[in-house]
Image: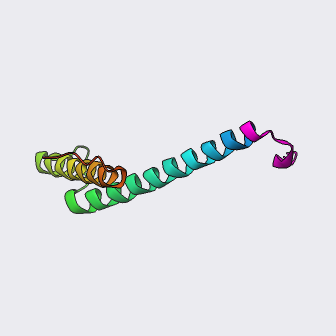
Amino acid sequence: MPEIDIADFSDADKADLIQFVEAEKRRATFQTAVNNYTDVCWEKCITRVNSSLSKDDKTCLSNCVERFLDSTIAVLGKLQGTAPSH
């Protein structure tokens, strides 16, 4: 694979590249958080591994994911100064 010298990029291309890299970092951070919450919710909610989830496991997972989403939205809102009021 050939090496790319960003010194040859225009200012607009450099700005686009920086924006792309920052977006990828945010995606990676979000994916890491999702994976962590998946692990937490799995450990908390799944009592047995069977061919299907029990009603209690499904309810627990649903509640766990909803709390994850609620907390994520609240944190992002606080960071952006637009936290939803309940």
Image coordinates of residue 75 in percent, x first then y, are: 30, 55
For the residue pair 45 and 9, the one nearer the viewer reads as 9
Image coordinates of residue 51 in percent, x first then y, are: 26, 44
x, y (%) of residue 32? 45, 56
Front residue of 27/81: it is: 81
- Quarter of the image where the N terminus is located: top right
Please state the horizontal and vertical placement of residue 67, each as a whole percent of the image. Answer: 21, 52
Q: How many marks?
A: 0
> Magenta stretch containing residue 5, yes or no?
yes
Q: Residue at x 55, y 52 (%)?
A: 25
Colour scheme in use? rainbow
Residue 55 lies in the magenta-colored region? no
Residue lying at 28% horizontally and 57% vertically, measured from the top left: 42
- In the picture shown, does residue 32 fall above or below 9? below
Residue ID at (32%, 50%): 81
Seen at 47% across and 55% down, the residue is 29
6 left or right of 59 in image: right
Position above or below: 50 against 36: above
In the rendered view, does 13 fall on the left or right side of 59? right
**Can residue 7 be spotted in the picture?**
yes
Q: Is residue 77 left or right of residue 32?
A: left
- Between 64 and 28, the residue placed more toward the observer is 28
Question: From which residue to which does the magenta span run?
Answer: 1-12
